[in-house]
């Protein structure tokens, strides 16, 4: 409180609830930077236009990595990627680790072939790496083009993030694949889907496969029922190489992202803490194994690896005890506990009866709402009723592909009952999604 005082099915996402045109962007003013590339007609290059927006943590001297939040397939999901870099919760993770947060948006027309971008070998790998160079120049952080990558992707974005991991294992600090994974076998029905091979060095990269139980785990029919078999095949192949790969199943959802971020961000935090170099430019560190936990595939109980009595090569990997306990709660009901309050809002300003402020999201539980206090009494809430059709209510709302709703929520409040000539004392209180208030 601050006082003024076969993933064919799973690669196609339903349209997002909010569908702004591709040319309607949130403003990209520092600390945001954006580049856009037109479609290419050259063989092997990206056939769709694409824009990349990056957020640079204010005050960071040198970046240690870049977190990529990759949307899924379909026109609606692609448009939802326009706000990926503006997500306050993902920014909290990036800020903690001196990382940039990058949100791509591929301008795929409705019903067009998603493989032409979600397979990195079709030009999106090269476009992504070019964007890192160009955004590094615009932001005056040239190290952006060489730092490690932490990759998160939904649906076709999971296919992309997994493909990038298989192609560049030495660049990837960690990867989370929500509902989509790379395919390892040819599919005669879809010749445009090219299989991948798994290099031995992929075993060094922590990977989390995350999907909803209704994607073939408990619901065996329907649009997304093929997701689990593809995830299982990918998990089995990577684990057979000794890979550090685990599976987390949301017990409530289908293809929508639900409350996955509350486990995913914690998992990513643990991996980045262990793997990122202390200084920009250093090599990735090896993931420590002495504290790892294991869990049976589709099980609900994790055990320290040294005490695990079943076949370890078939068990899901978890980086440490804290993450293992969070995983057990997530696969039960997604209600991962949080006992720490969110950061206090800052920079509260009052002009007339208009209040504005800044705030960081809580790393564990994000940001749900603000309370507006005047002379010791609560006079308003922002938003009045936080919304999220896919999980816990959030200040920024949430789209299908785990990105904020557009237009972006603004930290402001109008005190319509303020009287001219009177002096008031205002305070703003942040509330996270666990219901905890800031100090």
Image (cartoon, grey):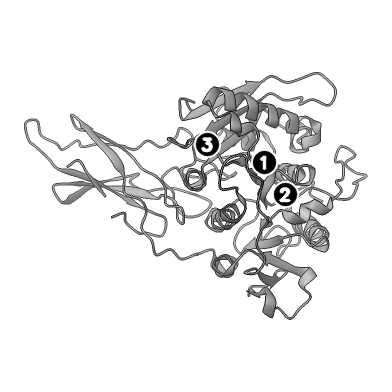
Among numbered discs 2 and 3, the one appearing first in the sequence: 3
Q: CA gap, disc 1 to disc 3? A: 30 Å
Q: Secondary structure at mark 2?
A: loop
* For marks 1 and 3 on the same chain, the one whose residue lies earlier in the sequence: 3
- Location of residue 432 in the rendering, given as x and y in whole percent from the top left corner: 39, 54
Residue 24 shows in this picture: no
Q: Secondary structure at mark 1?
A: loop
Residue 406 vertical placement versus 430 (above, below):
above
State the CA–CA distance, disc 2 to disc 1.
9 Å
Task: State the residue lying farthest toward the right.
Answer: 188
Q: Residues within 10 Å of mark 1 (few under 14, many from 20)?
A: many
C-alpha distance separating marks 2 and 3: 32 Å
Residue where numbered disc 1 is placed:
72
The residue lying at 74 percent from left, 55 percent from top is 204
x and y, in percent, of residue 116 in the image: 78, 32
Residue 41 shows in this picture: yes
Which quadrant holds residue 311?
A: bottom right
| Closer to viewer: mark 1 or mark 3 | 3
**Res 180 label:** 2
Instruction: Tell me the SS state at disc 3.
Output: loop
Q: Check if mark 2's residue and mark 1's residue have beta carbons within 8 Å.
A: yes
**Residue bearing mark 3:** 62
Left or right: where 352 falls relative to 126: left
Q: Position of residue 280 (x, y in %)?
A: 58, 40
Name the one closer to the observer, 323 or 258: 323
Quarter of the image where the C terminus is located: bottom left
Task: Name the N-terminal-most of marks 2 and 1.
Answer: 1
């Amino acid at each position: 409180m601050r006082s003024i005082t076969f993933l064919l099915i799973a690669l196609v996402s339903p349209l997002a609830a909010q569908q702004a045109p591709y040319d309607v962007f949130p403003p990209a003013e520092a600390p945001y930077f954006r580049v856009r590339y037109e479609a290419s007609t050259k063989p092997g290059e990206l056939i769709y236009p694409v824009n990349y927006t990056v957020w640079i943590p204010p005050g960071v001297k040198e970046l240690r990595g870049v977190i990529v939040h990759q949307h899924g397939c379909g026109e609606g999901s692609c448009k939802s990627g326009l706000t990926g870099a503006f997500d306050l919760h993902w920014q909290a993770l990036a800020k903690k680790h001196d990382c940039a947060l990058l949100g791509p948006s591929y301008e795929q027309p409705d019903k067009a072939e998603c493989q032409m971008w979600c397979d990195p070998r079709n030009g999106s790998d090269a476009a992504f790496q070019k964007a890192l160079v160009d955004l590094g120049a615009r932001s005056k952080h040239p190290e952006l083009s060489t730092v490690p990558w932490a990759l998160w992707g939904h649906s076709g974005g999971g296919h992309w993030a997994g493909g990038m991991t298989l192609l560049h294992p030495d660049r990837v600090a960690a990867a989370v694949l929500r509902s989509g994974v790379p395919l390892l076998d040819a599919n005669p029905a879809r010749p445009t889907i090219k299989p991948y091979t798994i290099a031995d060095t992929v075993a060094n990269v922590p990977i989390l496969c995350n999907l909803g139980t209704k994607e073939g785990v408990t619901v065996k029919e329907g649009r997304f029922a093929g997701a689990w078999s593809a995830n299982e095949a990918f998990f089995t192949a990577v684990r057979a190489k000794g890979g550090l790969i685990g599976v987390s199943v949301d017990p409530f959802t289908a293809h929508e992202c639900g409350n996955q971020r509350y486990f995913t961000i914690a998992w990513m935090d643990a991996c980045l803490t262990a793997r990122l170099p202390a200084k920009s430019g250093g090599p990735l560190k090896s993931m420590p194994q002495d504290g790892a936990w294991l869990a049976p595939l589709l099980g609900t109980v994790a055990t320290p690896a040294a005490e695990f009595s079943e076949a370890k090569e078939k068990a899901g990997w978890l980086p440490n005890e804290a993450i293992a306990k969070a995983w057990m709660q997530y696969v039960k009901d997604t209600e991962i506990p949080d006992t720490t309050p969110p950061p206090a809002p800052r920079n509260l300003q009052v002009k007339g009866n208009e209040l504005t402020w800044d705030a960081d999201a809580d790393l564990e539980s994000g940001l749900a709402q603000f309370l507006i206090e005047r002379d010791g009494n609560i006079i308003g809430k922002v938003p009045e009723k936080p919304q999220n059709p896919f999980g816990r209510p959030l200040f920024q709302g949430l789209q299908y592909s785990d990105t904020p709703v557009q237009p972006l929520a603004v930290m402001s409040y109008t005190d319509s009952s303020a009287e001219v000539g009177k002096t008031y004392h205002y305070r703003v209180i942040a509330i996270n999604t666990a219901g905890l208030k800031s100090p």
